[in-house]
Amino acid sequence: MSDDSNVLNILTSPAQIATWNTQKLPSDQVSVENGAILCSSERYSLIIDPQLQGITWLKERAKNDNLQVTRLTNPKIVKTIEFAIEQGQPVMIENLDNAIDAVLQPVYARAVIKKGRNRYIKMGDKELALNPKFNLFLHTKLSNPHYPPEIQAECTLINFTVTETGLEDQLLDLVVLKERPDLSAQSVELIQQQNEFKITLSNLEEDLLQRLANAQGDILDDIELVENLEKSKMLSVEISEKVAIAKETQAAIYEASEAYRPAANRGALVFFLMNELFMIHSFYRFSLDSFIIVVKRAIDIVAEAMKPVKKEKGSDDEEEEEEEVDPDDEEGE
């Protein structure tokens, strides 16, 4: 019921979002929302990912969970999925076309059979014991796929296609990281500091509640409890002051970063103009990764080009000063 309610604050935390960003998830609003949907949904995910940003993040995120990456063209795909269901390994089926093999229907539809306390999925003639850790990700590079309605109803459809606003935010982070690495480092440090503050306050609350619940007799007679309350209050006030300072610093960082917004805006505009050229000919197709490499290279080229310009200006000024002095010297002689 709060005025500034935000679903992301319920589904995620700043620490979790920061972790996703280190795992190569773009930091724009759309990508973060997609990450929250994918991690919170009970249904298996069908990812529309023409720029391959979603699959890059998922591979990085699940690399320690023994992620199995396969394709429908793989002759061993059924065995891979059967083994993963029983062993509790995540499976990613990448590069799907508009058609999905019917043998996968019981899996992505979560057609679970309950027998006592155990749960099973029937694939063909086999009943496979479903491990709770099993997860399935369906991935397509098609920008506008056409799947049957039942697939869209049985899976969580997540569109990772980059938007102009999202790309602008990504390019802004890239430019700031390149031009002002101090601001990026300071922002990361602030997020970590805020998370530590939240953990400390949570631990204080739990400790106080436990002490109050176990207190016997008159609470005021428990000197240790009173002293602990005073320490907790002092620490809470100190943290509140630091949080207020951190908010001011964060606002200053945001304001400084916004100075690079025109460059990010122009970069996003150029990419989407280039992205429309395939309508002229299929030859004109550009990946987002190659475009970002070009942007980084352009920033480096401009930075290098500006260095000798300053030197030339200085040398020209010296020559002008020398030319002004020479006639005076001749007149004096």
Image: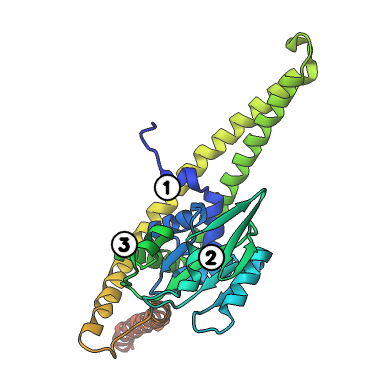
Which quarter of the figure has residue 300?
bottom left
- Whichever of callouts 1 and 3 sits on the residue coming sooner in the sequence is 3
Q: Are marks 1 and 3 in contact (CB under 8 Å)?
A: no
| Residue 327: % across, % down | 29, 87
| 246, above or below 129, in the image | above
Question: Of all residues shown, which one is farthest toward the top?
Answer: 218
Residue designated by label 1: 251
User: Which amino acid lies under the numbered mark 1 shown in the image of this protein?
Assistant: Ala
Give SS at disc 1. Answer: helix
| Horizontal relation, residue 88 to residue 302: left or right | right
| 116, above or below 147, in the image | above
> Which label sits on residue 165?
3
Quadrant (top left, top right, bottom left, bottom right) of the N terminus: top left
| Residue 246: % across, % down | 51, 44
User: Which amino acid lies under the numbered mark 3 shown in the image of this protein?
Assistant: Thr
Residue designated by label 2: 136
Dot 3: few (<14), some (14–19), or many (≥20) neighbours within 10 Å? some
Dot 2: few (<14), some (14–19), or many (≥20) neighbours within 10 Å? many
